[in-house]
Amino acid sequence: MSSTKALKTDWTWEEWQQSRAARRAATLRVGPPVTRRKESSSDRRLRAAFKGQRGPNFDSGR
Amino acid sequence: MDGTEQLVRDIEATPSLLERALKLTGLVTRLFREAGWDLVVVGGSAVEFYTEGAYMSGDIDLCRRTAAPIPLRRAQDLMGQLGATGGPRSWKVAGLFVDVLGLLENEAVTPCRTITTPCGPITIIPPELAVVERTLPAFYPKPDREARNVARKMLTACVRGSTPVDWDEIDRLARLPAYNVAKELASLKKEVTRELNQSA
């Protein structure tokens, strides 16, 4: 391995929160805003629990 | 209301799905660690952590790093402390499902990543492994657009440096017979790099 020593591997909560927007902006450039799978083996319990969806809504600020 | 109950209520009231999931994972991780088992986040929550790609569903997948199995009764008692319902391997708590799957399979030599949540530190599978794992279903058994989108987002976060990774390790993992997706991954990486450069 060439770069493990330089890798950032630990985040504080604050560091992570500050990094979220940049990560989201980057990934939005290459694909749809939502990539949640349309189905999986857990569909029955998920849709029963989340009003027909496979999970709760994402951040309101997204 | 005791401290744990209050924490669960606070978690339930957290508006961001990913923040809610990470805080809940912090609480679950702490309980199991105190009982002798280390847990690691795998699956959609890990991908969400690395991409912010609106990928995760309403469940959190955890594997144990500790070799010793968790007796189901012990797991029930631990999750019961959080007011969880269901079990014995999947519970509902704080409005989300928590699945404790089994022993972690991790071929990566790079470290798991950690984040210290307000409810305790959690461990997440290495992004190097997540990238390779997500590339596989994008191409096999047949090309899959949904899976490709997720793999592209993982690669983008890595290429942009918002999720720092060891590319040599990604290449090594992708070449393993278990995955055998080095060519496909390289092509996808080139594709997103080109798109990022064009839209810069």
Image (spheres, grey):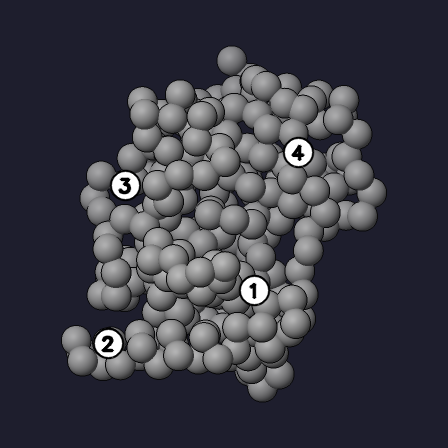
Residue B94 placed where, x, y %?
46, 25
Q: Disc count in the image?
A: 4
Secondary structure at badge 1 equals helix
Residue that mark 4 sits on = B31
Extreme residue toward the front, this view: B142
Q: Residue at x 62, y 49 (%)?
A: B40
* Pointers 1 and 4 within a single chain: yes
Contact (Cβ within 8 Å) of mark 3 with mark 1? no
Q: Is residue B15 above or below residue B153?
A: above
Residue B122 placed where, x, y %?
57, 48
What crowding class fits label 2: few (fewer than 14 Cα within 10 Å), some (14-19), or many (20 or more)?
Answer: some
Q: Amino acid at mark 1?
A: Leu
Q: CA distance from mark 2 to mark 1?
A: 23 Å
Secondary structure at badge 3 equals loop
* In front of the other: B36 or B177: B177
Q: CA distance from mark 4 to mark 3?
A: 27 Å
What crowding class fits label 3: few (fewer than 14 Cα within 10 Å), some (14-19), or many (20 or more)?
Answer: few
Q: CA distance from mark 3 to mark 1?
A: 26 Å
Extreme residue toward the bottom, this view: A2
Secondary structure at badge 2 equals helix
Q: Residue at x 51, y 13 (%)?
A: B1
* Pointers 2 and 4 within a single chain: yes
Left or right, A32 with reference to B27? left
Q: Is residue B30 above or below residue A5?
A: above
**First in sequence: mark 2 or mark 4?**
4
Left or right, B120 with reference to A16? right
